[in-house]
Image: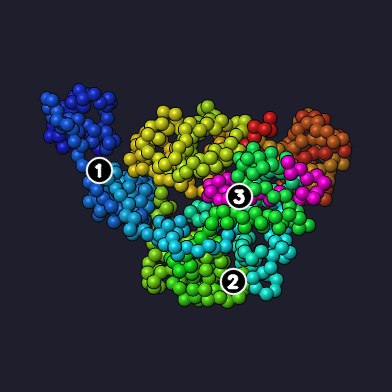
């Protein structure tokens, strides 16, 4: 706000206003013409307040209430707040959001604007029932007496080459009988098997990326994770990733120590490594069952399946086949013959051919439904996988599928999802910033649960390096509030949120104090951004890349500053006006520059491998017949974290 505008509001001259501002204790430059709106508001309140003696109990003026949808256009927000559109756009810009008149923004961005204009925003949850729905919410509303036991859904995961695929093949072919006659030759990302009278659903997906995508959308299809660890290789990077995901989703973990029949197998070492990673074996007083197996030779697989069934009985997985239908997308693609196709696992209710459904931003009527054997089915009950077609678009992995009364309502809900996702593009995100001067990265971490905090802490430990120090100033559970912002300001830290929100008042304060805030849905996006912030602090190293080599066959002329020589290009290509290195008997003896190249007595810019040429070379050492000259380019070496253990 301009000083002159403020003086007009107070009906006093600019010079009188400056005098009163100083008397009121505000430290303002005598030449400043424009001040921040927040400061202007404080000055206005201070100069217009009338002291009373003694003042009555101060009752703060009630803020104006405004109810905002999860997604609102800039134009609609302007009308709700009763302020010009230009003022809304300007406020968004000052908060790092570029959105035009008709573009949609999410509640978080809209709430910051509303707070700026003196409103107290609340989110309209009623208009967002589908977006805020989860499988847990649906089950919580079901009649307890209507719930029935359902088959467990098991994901087999682990590090590359530790035997996941072989274990699934062994279970599928040797230890179980298929529910349908004949062997299962094709499947749809999941299949069912019958073992000792109990049905078990196995997921070939999610893979690691798919699992992360499901987690990002709040989807937790897996009831039990079987973690495969090779007895001859031990705990690896992807092993730790699976452990973290199990912790994040609070999914029971069964460890299958594979390849125990190999001579170099060391199951006890694997147990020790997993215990250090926070997975304690039952025999050591922990909660995780450990089963030694050989997937290749079908050793211990029966015991592993017994453990799966026992875990399922203890956890008591249930659903209501006659209740609200909800499923999760585990695979999707565009078929040339069937159009958009999605593989889903029903988690409650029953999915029928002909149902009007919404899956993410896709909607439609289920035209065809197939089981894992590509056999057409009309109904699918809880824990059963099915491939469906009839959707308007290809849904994303992890999207929730719901049944709606009619196609019109389904289309409306799908449109709302698309608007919500589009609005997320304009979410306020300031980025992770490191302390370049001190080579340090200070973080304050807030998450939705204690389990999330532990998983983030473990991921950050893996980023410890020799170049940049990572310090977690504080961590806690809940939304990011004003206290967190003040703490981040005092410690010069970046505020990181995981699966939570930033309170509008905190976002406003963060902008005033210059505090950076980032909120994530996927833990590996968080670690990627932190890794990027660390690498930005590391000074680049230059490496020399050889692009061509030539052997000197003759020295024709030697001058004070150069040599004329003939040779043949042995590797790559020679280029004129490039730096070179000189090698003699395999040892580097000096450097120089290839100033000219000739072929057939004509000057050229480059000569390919296998071709003889003439060269004019300036060098720091005398050249001889038989020397090797190598043309090189200087490139910036790719930055990498130097792990602490690499010292």
- Residue 308 in picture, x, y percent from top left: 63, 56
Q: Does residue 423 appear in this view?
A: yes
Q: Position of residue 69 (x, y in %)?
A: 32, 55
Q: Earlier in the sequence, mark 2 or mark 3?
A: 3
10 Å crowding of disc 3: few (<14), some (14-19), many (20+): many
Q: Nearer the viewer, residue 115 or 60?
A: 60
> x%, y% of residue 301?
71, 56
The residue wearing badge 1 is 118
- Please state if 69 lies on the left or on the right of 342 as rendered: left
Which of the two discs, 3 and 1, labels the residue nearer the N terminus? 1
Disc 1 secondary structure class: loop
Q: Nearer the viewer, residue 147 or 333?
A: 147
Q: Give the mark toward the camera: 3 or 1.
A: 3
Tell whether label 3 touches label 2 (CB within 8 Å): no
Residue found at the far front of this picture: 145
- In the image, residue 590 sits, relative to residue 185, either above or below, namely above
Residue at 42% over, 32% down: 488
Per the image, label 3 sits on a secondary structure element best described as: strand
Residue shown at the point (18%, 24%) measured from the top left: 19
Residue beneath the point at 83% across and 39% down: 628
**Residue mark closest to the camera, 2 vs 3:** 3
Q: Which residues are magenta?
A: 240-268
What is the distance, in whole Å, between disc 2 and disc 3 at their CAs? 27 Å
Is the residue 439 above or below the residue 528 in the image? above
Tag on residue 371? 2
Magenta-span inclusion, residue 264: yes
Q: Position of residue 627 (x, y in %)?
A: 85, 37
Helix, strand or loop at mark 2:
loop
Please name the residue that numbered disc 3 is placed on: 253
Q: Marks 2 and 1, Cα distance to the nearest angstrom?
A: 56 Å
Badge 2 density bin: few <14, some 14–19, many ≥20, Cα 10 Å? many
- Position of the N terminus by quadrant: top left
């Amino acid at each position: 706000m301009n000083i002159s505008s403020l003086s007009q509001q107070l009906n006093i001259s600019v010079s009188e206003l400056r005098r009163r501002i100083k008397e009121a204790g505000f430290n303002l430059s005598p030449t400043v013409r424009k001040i921040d709106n927040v400061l202007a508001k404080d000055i206005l309140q201070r100069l217009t307040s009338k002291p009373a003696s003694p003042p009555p109990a101060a009752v703060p003026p009630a803020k104006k209430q405004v109810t905002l949808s999860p997604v609102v256009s800039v134009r609609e927000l302007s009308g709700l707040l009763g302020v010009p559109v230009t003022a809304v756009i300007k406020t968004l810009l000052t908060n790092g959001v570029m959105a035009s008149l008709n573009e949609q923004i999410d509640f978080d961005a809209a709430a910051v604007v509303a707070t700026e204009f003196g409103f107290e925003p609340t989110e309209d949850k009623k208009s967002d029932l589908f977006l805020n729905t989860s499988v847990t919410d649906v089950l919580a509303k079901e009649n307890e007496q209507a719930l029935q036991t359902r088959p467990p859904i098991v994901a087999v995961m682990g590090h590359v080459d530790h035997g996941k695929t072989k274990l699934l093949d062994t279970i599928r072919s040797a230890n179980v009988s298929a529910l349908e006659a004949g062997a299962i030759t094709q499947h749809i990302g999941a299949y069912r098997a019958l073992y000792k009278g109990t049905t078990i659903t196995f997921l070939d997906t999610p893979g690691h990326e798919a699992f992360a995508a499901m987690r990002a959308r709040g989807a937790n299809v897996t009831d039990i994770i079987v973690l495969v660890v090779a007895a001859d290789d031990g705990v690896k990077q992807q092993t730790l990733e699976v452990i973290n995901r199990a912790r994040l989703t609070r999914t029971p973990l069964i460890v299958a120590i594979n390849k125990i029949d190999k001579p170099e197998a060391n199951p006890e070492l694997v147990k020790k490594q997993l215990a250090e990673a926070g997975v304690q074996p039952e025999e050591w007083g922990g909660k995780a069952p450990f089963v030694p197996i050989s997937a290749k030779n079908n050793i211990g697989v029966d015991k592993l399946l017994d453990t799966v069934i026992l875990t399922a009985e203890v956890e008591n997985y249930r659903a209501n086949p006659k209740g609200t239908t909800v499923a999760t997308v585990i695979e999707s693609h565009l078929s040339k013959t069937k159009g958009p196709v999605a593989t889903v696992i029903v988690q409650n209710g029953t999915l029928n051919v002909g149902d009007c459904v919404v899956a993410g931003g896709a909607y439609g009527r289920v035209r065809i439904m197939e089981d894992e054997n590509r056999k057409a089915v009309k109904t699918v009950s809880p824990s059963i996988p099915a491939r469906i077609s009839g959707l308007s678009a290809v849904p994303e992995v992890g999207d929730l599928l719901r049944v709606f009364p009619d196609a019109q309502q389904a289309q409306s809900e799908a449109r709302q999802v698309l608007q919500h996702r589009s609005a997320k593009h304009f979410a306020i995100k300031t980025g992770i910033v490191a302390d370049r001067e001190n080579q340090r990265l200070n973080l304050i971490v807030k998450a939705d649960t204690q389990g999330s905090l532990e998983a983030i802490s473990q991921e950050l430990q893996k980023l410890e390096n020799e170049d940049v120090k990572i310090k977690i100033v504080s961590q806690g559970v809940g939304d990011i509030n004003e206290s967190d912002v003040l703490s981040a300001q005092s410690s010069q830290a970046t505020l990181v949120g995981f699966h939570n929100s930033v309170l509008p008042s905190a976002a406003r304060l963060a902008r005033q104090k210059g505090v950076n805030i980032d909120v994530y849905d996927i833990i590996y996006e968080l670690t990627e951004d932190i890794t990027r912030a660390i690498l930005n602090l590391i000074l680049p190293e230059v490496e020399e890349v050889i692009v061509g080599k030539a052997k000197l066959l003759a020295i024709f002329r030697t001058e004070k500053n150069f040599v004329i020589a003939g040779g043949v290009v042995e590797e790559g290509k020679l280029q004129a006006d490039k730096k070179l290195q000189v090698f003699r008997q395999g040892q580097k003896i000096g450097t120089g520059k290839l100033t000219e190249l000739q072929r057939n007595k004509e000057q050229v810019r480059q000569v390919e491998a296998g071709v003889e040429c003439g060269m004019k070379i300036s060098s720091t050492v005398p050249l001889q017949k038989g020397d090797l000259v190598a043309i090189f380019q200087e490139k910036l070496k790719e930055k990498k974290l130097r792990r602490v253990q690499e010292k």
